[in-house]
């Protein structure tokens, strides 16, 4: 991947992220060292791939559409692609070699889902699509999470897409009928369309197309409890209930994990190049910079599965030094050293 787009975005983040342009300039053009630096930069800054996959009919396309439309994922420099279906007779399964693999199930996870998700190379984010059609949703979520070994995120995809597209344009037609809507009316779209409520069939059909009967129920209950609730608040409630925010947050976190891991590997390789090449003074200076120290800290925190402390103190630094001194594994000691170094640098700025 070229340096203009990705590198430009990262440079805007200042010393809180690694600048591709700065890394590539650490060695003179035409030298062996420059070729090695460029190779490491290529590996670090190549586009992150998000693969959406699963068996046929589980809702992969809807999940991909939800992820592609969300503004938080459009700013991550990641490509979102949908694979062919898993477990199609006489057809080889697609290779799950994406950096992030969004594995979609509908209902319970089958043995083929478990095998495919476990065989994926990247960070796996399981999504339970069509969650509005699942009975005993929490039991299914718990069961699938247990089988896959990581948390599955339920998603009502049609509701999520409609909310992001501001559909329906208004919930006003439902407002005066909300209190009359009963659970029995929402068992099927046809029942809701035939129900004896003061709301036109055209408005009902538009509402069902936009948010399905599950969304109608959520909106009707909200408007019954708070008749003055405005459309924007109803949409926020639908977005929350749809699972949209949780799914996007999980995918974004996975992308950030991938990026942090790549930057951590880049810093390790730059250290190795600095030790091997006498002319690598610029690399040594870079490794001592705020940018490199903070990137190393973030990579270590991601490796340890911990969040950055919002307000570190000297006590925070001491606690990480204690973790370094008591670590049983060299990798854990190196990670604790990087985190402590980063917090100390923050305090000294």
Image (spheres, helix red, strand yellow):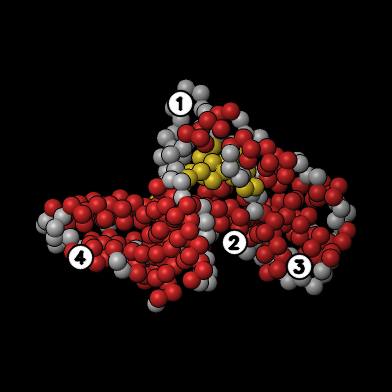
The answer to whether mark 3 and mark 4 are in CB contact below 8 A is no
Residue topped by disc 4: 282
Res 300 visible: no
Where does residue 164 sit, x and y in percent of width and height? 59, 61
Label 2 neighbour load within 10 Å: few <14, some 14-19, many 20+: few
Q: Toward the viewer: 118 or 82?
A: 118
**Mark 1, mark 3: which one is toward the viewer?**
1
Identify the disc placed on residue 210.
none
Q: Tell me the quarter of the picture where residue 344 sits.
A: bottom left
What's the CA distance linking mark 4 and mark 1? 52 Å
Identify the residue at horizontal 78%, vertical 55% (top origin). Answer: 217
**Mark 1, mark 2: which one is toward the viewer?**
1
Upstream in sequence: badge 1 or badge 3: 1
Label 3 neighbour load within 10 Å: few <14, some 14-19, many 20+: some
Res 237 visible: yes
Upstream in sequence: badge 3 or badge 4: 3
Upstream in sequence: badge 1 or badge 2: 1
Quadrant placement of the N terminus: bottom left
Residue topped by disc 2: 165
What's the CA distance linking mark 3 and mark 4? 64 Å
- Secondary structure, mark 4, is helix
**Mark 2, mark 4: which one is toward the viewer?**
4
Identify the residue at horizontal 35%, vertical 69% (top origin). Answer: 290
Residue topped by disc 1: 91
What's the CA distance linking mark 1 and mark 2? 36 Å
Upstream in sequence: badge 4 or badge 1: 1
Label 4 neighbour load within 10 Å: few <14, some 14-19, many 20+: some
Q: Toward the viewer: 167 or 226?
A: 226
């Amino acid at each position: 991947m070229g340096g203009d787009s990705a590198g430009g975005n990262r440079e805007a983040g200042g010393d809180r992220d690694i600048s591709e342009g700065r890394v590539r300039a650490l060695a003179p053009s035409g030298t062996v060292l420059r070729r090695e630096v460029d190779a490491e930069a290529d590996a670090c800054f190549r586009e992150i791939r998000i693969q959406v996959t699963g068996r046929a009919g589980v809702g992969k396309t809807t999940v991909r559409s939800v992820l592609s439309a969300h503004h938080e994922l459009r700013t991550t420099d990641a490509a979102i692609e949908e694979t062919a279906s898993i477990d199609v007779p006489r057809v080889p399964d697609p290779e799950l070699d994406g950096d992030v693999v969004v594995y979609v199930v509908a209902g319970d996870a089958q043995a083929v889902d478990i095998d495919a998700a476990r065989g994926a190379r990247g960070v796996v984010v399981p999504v339970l699509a069509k969650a509005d059609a699942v009975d005993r949703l929490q039991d299914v979520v718990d069961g699938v999470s247990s089988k896959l070994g990581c948390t599955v995120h339920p998603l009502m995809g049609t509701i999520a897409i409609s909310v992001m597209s501001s559909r329906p344009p208004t919930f006003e037609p439902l407002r005066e009928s909300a209190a009359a809507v009963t659970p029995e009316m929402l068992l099927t779209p046809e029942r809701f369309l035939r129900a004896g409520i003061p709301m036109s069939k055209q408005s009902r059909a538009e509402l069902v197309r936009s948010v399905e009967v599950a969304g109608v129920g959520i909106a009707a209950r909200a408007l019954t409890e708070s008749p003055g609730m405005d459309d924007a608040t109803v949409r926020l409630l639908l977005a929350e209930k749809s699972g949209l925010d949780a799914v996007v947050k999980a995918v974004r976190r996975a992308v950030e994990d991938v990026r942090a891991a790549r930057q951590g590997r880049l810093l390790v390789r730059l250290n190795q190049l600095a030790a091997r090449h006498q002319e690598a003074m610029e690399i040594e200076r870079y490794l001592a910079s705020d940018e490199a120290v903070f990137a190393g800290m973030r990579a270590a925190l991601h490796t340890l599965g911990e969040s950055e402390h919002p307000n570190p103190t000297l006590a925070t630094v001491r606690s990480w030094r204690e973790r370094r001194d008591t670590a049983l594994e060299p990798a854990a000691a190196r990670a604790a050293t990087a985190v402590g170094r980063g917090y100390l640098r923050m305090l000294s700025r």
